[in-house]
Amino acid sequence: MTNSQATAYPQKPAQSPSDCRILAAEDNPALGDVISGLLRILGYSVDVASDGEQAVKQWRENSYHLILMDCVLPKLDGFEATRRIRAEEKSTEKKVPIVGLTSDTDQEKRKRGLAAGMDGFRQKPITVELLEEVLEQFSLR
């Protein structure tokens, strides 16, 4: 359930997983551990943000190859966090793929995510296969 990648990302692609840095915005500590653990097993560097404000702050301070954005986050939901990142990207050289994550099948959430600027949308549960698909989609695998 993803849309096509219509935007070119100017950041140099990672040469290997160890060169790639991913931000996972997830407020559930156990799920944040699952996502970061699976990505680390695959060889990627991962930071976890526990709310939308923290996700935007970490994006400002670091360079990421991908953001996995939970849609339901405290302080700022994933949609608003994505909108803020996209608005700030307009004045920078930064452009990072953002993939929305949700635990339900609500098509309205998917539409809201894409309208906010998400490049794709995936339904939980998080599995290694789901992560590999997302990494492949954005040429990070």
Image (spheres, rainbow, N blue to C red):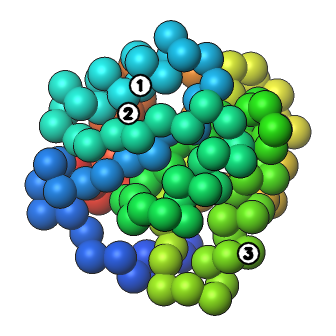
The relative height of residue 23 versus residue 20 in the rendered view (above or below) is above
Q: Which residue is mark 3?
A: 87
Residue 126 at x, y = what percent? 47, 20
Query: Residue 19: x percent and y percent?
Result: 17, 57
Percent of width and height locating residue 31:
51, 16
What amino acid does circle 3 point to?
Answer: Ala
* Tag 2: amino acid: Leu
Let me know if residue 93 appears in the view.
Answer: yes
Is residue 134 in view from this perspective?
A: no
| CB atoms of marks 3 and 1 within 8 Å | no
What whole-number distance in Å separates the C-alpha atoms at marks 3 and 2? 26 Å
| Residue on which disc 1 sits | 35
In percent of width and height, residue 58 lies at 53, 54
Q: Are marks 1 and 2 in contact (CB under 8 Å)?
A: yes
Disc 1 element: helix
* Amino acid on which disc 1 is placed: Ile
